[in-house]
Amino acid sequence: MKSSYFFTSIWFNLALSTVIWSTMVMAVPHVAHISMNGLRAMIEFNTGESSVEINVTLGCESCVSDSDQFTWNVHQNPMLYDREEPCSSNYVGSVFMTGSGNLADTHGNLTGAQLNAGSVTFTDNSINFQGQTSLSGRAIVFEKVSDTTQRYCASIRPVEAVRTAVATFQYPVAGTVVFRQLMGENDAADTSIYVDLDVTAAPLQSRNLTWQIKSNGGVTFDMTLDQQCQSVNDENIYDLTSEFGYLNVETISNHVFYYFIDPNLSLEGENSVLDMSLVLSDITGTSVACPTIRELTPKTIYSYVSSKNISGTVTFSQRSPWDHTTIRVDIQNLQSLIGGYHVHEYPIPPRYFESDNLADVNSVAGHFNPYGITDFPDPTVGTEDQYEIGDISNKFGYLTDLDSINESYTDWNMPLFGTNSIVGRSIVLHLNSDGSRYAYGQIGYPSLVKTVIVDFKAPVTGSIIMRQDANDPLADASVFVDIANVDGTSTVDHNWHVHIQKIDNDYLADEGRCLANEGHYNPFNVDLDNNYSECSPSNPRRCEAGDFSGKHGQLDISATLHTSDGKFFFTDIQLPLSGVYSIDERSVVIHDKDSGAGRLACHDTFEVLSKTVSTTIWTDTTVSGSIVFEQKGLHDPPEISVDIRGLANLANGWHVHVLPVPYEENEDGVCSLTLGHFNPFNIVGSPAVATLDLYEVGDLSGKFETLEDRTSFQDVFTDQTMTLRGPRSIDGRSIVVHRDDETGSRWSCTTLEKVLDDESFGVEASATFDQDAVAGSITFRQTHQGNDYLGDTTIDSALDLPDNSVSNWSVLDTTEVSECNLSSEVYDPFNVQDDTAQCSLARQGQCIVGNLGGKHDSIPDGGALFTDTNLPLIGQTPIIGRVLRLKIGDDIYCSQIQPLKEQGVEMTLSFPAAVDFDPYDFRSALSEGVENLEMWQIVVSSDSYPSPSNSECQTIAFWVIGSNVEDLEGDITEATDLGDYSPMECSEGLQPVKVRPRPFNLG
């Protein structure tokens, strides 16, 4: 290490910096780009041996008048664009007098006449760009003499790339210390240090802290803050207290920024402090916070436009929040149709119907405009801050009369970091003729993300989807809300928070709802007793990590799901989705309307795992290999990996077809029974060249490549129009390879099945029918993940319906086929009661759970496959054990939904009559009392079951599900200690626990 890394005095370092200034190679040129309030100017600083030449050049026409005058000074701190008033002295500090930053005093005010005449040049002998008095990184501020509220500013930056590193603090102080150094100087360049910290934990008072950089024994995100400090080694690597004095950290209300330049601290080379710990200690020497100094990774994100025959990419890149964003627009086949294009608020939604416009106001809302700008200059005339953040076309020019564009732009007001980030939102291209929304693209994420979801059931339905870098819980997290009231009413001003515990059996209770979730999640012990009103969207660090309403504002709940009234999108700077402080496997609670404190709705937070669907057995074994579809997030486009062989130059088309392969038919024409291509949006034809949305969803050869003249085929594709999740999923359907003959006959086919990881279990249940009017089965399949998340339910109807279709079908609120009739109640565990106005394929959360006809319409003869997003087979509201009713013509046919024999067994258990039976408590007691039996494996389909005449006991029937069901059957039979539900004999000869024979399904 350098000798200066040990305990050198501040006086020695000041002297050293003077020596460096006089003997080193001249500092790299610096520049400040002002682009603000209609003024564009470039201020260049070119260092000579003993002076600095300053060139000021105006970059706009008629933006200043000759009579205007401006003071111009360098201020103490850097300027960050992502603020409503970035030039405020609250942020940039006072004039940097120590470094001779008072340029107006030295060189006089700048006049409009000077600026309009051309570049203005000054020579300055008192400023420098090395050592502790360097101007590097600080803000230069122009202030209009006639109106001091008119300020224009920018940071003075090296013309070459800068490396950025950040130490993020969470307790007892919160905020960041940012280190920046010119790249490629091999530790010779100065490092700037920007301190932005607040005291957030009790006692809420100013703290004087020492700060040192120390090595550590390795720090991971699975370590608590205390453990991170315990991993720190004792010896100081670099003592910042000796360099700059104690660090005085104030509360939010007295916030102070600090900015230092250190000529001896390095972020690269053998003396790099990256991955070391920045340790803050109190006056006793006790470490209070020890975060790691981590390099900040630059962000690049892409929006792939592929719709309406317009295709291309819009790329956004930003090195750090202190740097501009570069926008690269590369779009083809605009056909002179497009005018404006913008970043919109919300991500592109899934497509449900042929008539859907995925860029309409209910889908993506308006332009991204967090500062509420309503009055802006003509196109390209103003500076970026004068337009909505998302208004690319007004900032840089419309696409009018263009067939293609390939341009790059510099935008100082298009953040990829922080609360106003565009990451995860969308791009919309508007028609020039009438401004209507035409083509679109999803804006992606800069890295692999972890997705955490909250699926609300009742009385609120919908979801909250949170996404964050999978390996960095300190990174920005996006939060997308899409919710509605189940009953079709609209309400406003709901508080919402992450709570500590997962839901219990009170999440639907009339009284005491969601109390089991306990309090707000506050892992960093933010002080709640003193001035918690300081928590706000502008001060999110003062909020509990789980206080969504404090950080982002209250929620309004729409009457109808998937409308802009019930959608919100936020970027959260303190929401860990991984690591020891993760909000995963907790819960979110929505409170009562009108700022009420009562708890309205709650549900658990679950990680969404990548979903993979793969081909299985090929019917003609000449064809071999696999086609694998993988979808990482909920709405990410699937990646299609193709590796098939044995084609022998005989194949051509390959498609996803509607139905799975009925292997049991065992006949040559079995591929013909898979029906046609999967085409939910009724696309006609297969164009030679087009964007993916103009093909049938299942037309893989049309979208990508045919199999013509191939013996094998290996490739990887991405399909933005296909999904493995939701109502239009391809899961459970089939792939058909067609021959290269005149008719494109079907050669070989295979069913697409979900690939399960070791911790997941595929639950299957079916209802069978054997009558003249209906014969066959309806099979329900759902995956239980290792984290208890239940995926979509696939419904495979393999019914022979000689004379008619099933006009209506429902799951009933009964376990007895004998109780099935036209007036039987449809299973409605969430008390929807009337779903006629809201229920549809797209809004299944607003449907009665058992209303399958309302969600999926009728069942045709010849088979059908549906995907249901609101039909749990197991859990607290299961359909296993209940009765499925089909209406065909004027008749009804009924059958009990039973798990496959190899998966499930029905049992009964008798226990004291005095016990107030609760299905949740029963399942909990049974899982705790029987080894290797998990709660999800127990299915209770009814609150009661007819008991023997002995009044001292009651008997309940339940199902046990799982791959270990045979072992569990014996273990449960022998169980004795189940708490309140411990088995008892009700009458002589009657076993307290037994396997119940399967009832006969009456059709």
Image (cartoon, rainbow, N blue to C red):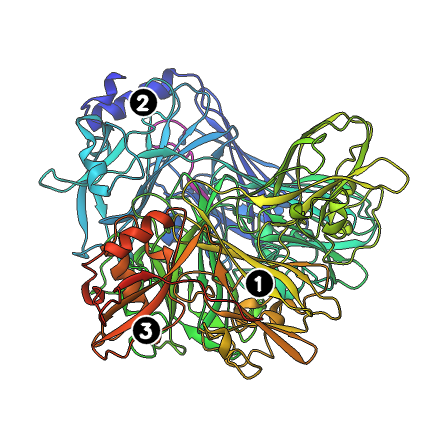
CA distance for labels 3 and 2: 68 Å
Q: Amino acid at mark 2?
A: Thr
Give the residue displayed 52% in from the left and 74% down from the top: 848
Q: Is residue 382 visible?
A: no
Label 3 belongs to which residue? Answer: 513
Kindly indicate whether the residue at mark 3 contacts the one at mark 1 (C-beta within 8 angstroms): no
| Residue carrying label 1 | 768
Marks 3 and 2: CB-CB under 8 Å? no
Q: Quadrant of the N terminus?
A: top left
Which range of residues does the magenta coloring cover? 128-140
Q: Is residue 133 magenta?
A: yes
Q: What separation in Å lies between label 1 and label 3 (alpha carbons)?
A: 38 Å
Quadrant (top left, top right, bottom left, bottom right) of the C terminus: bottom right
Q: Report the amino acid beneath label 1.
A: Thr
- Kind of residue at badge 3: Arg
**Can you identify the residue that label 2 sits on?**
18
Helix, strand, or loop for circle 1? strand
Give the dominant element type of the magenta stretch: helix, strand or loop.
loop
Q: Residue furthest right?
A: 742
Q: First in sequence: mark 1 or mark 2?
A: 2
Other-residue count near label 3 (Cα within 10 Å), few / some / many at <14 / 14–19 / ≥20? some
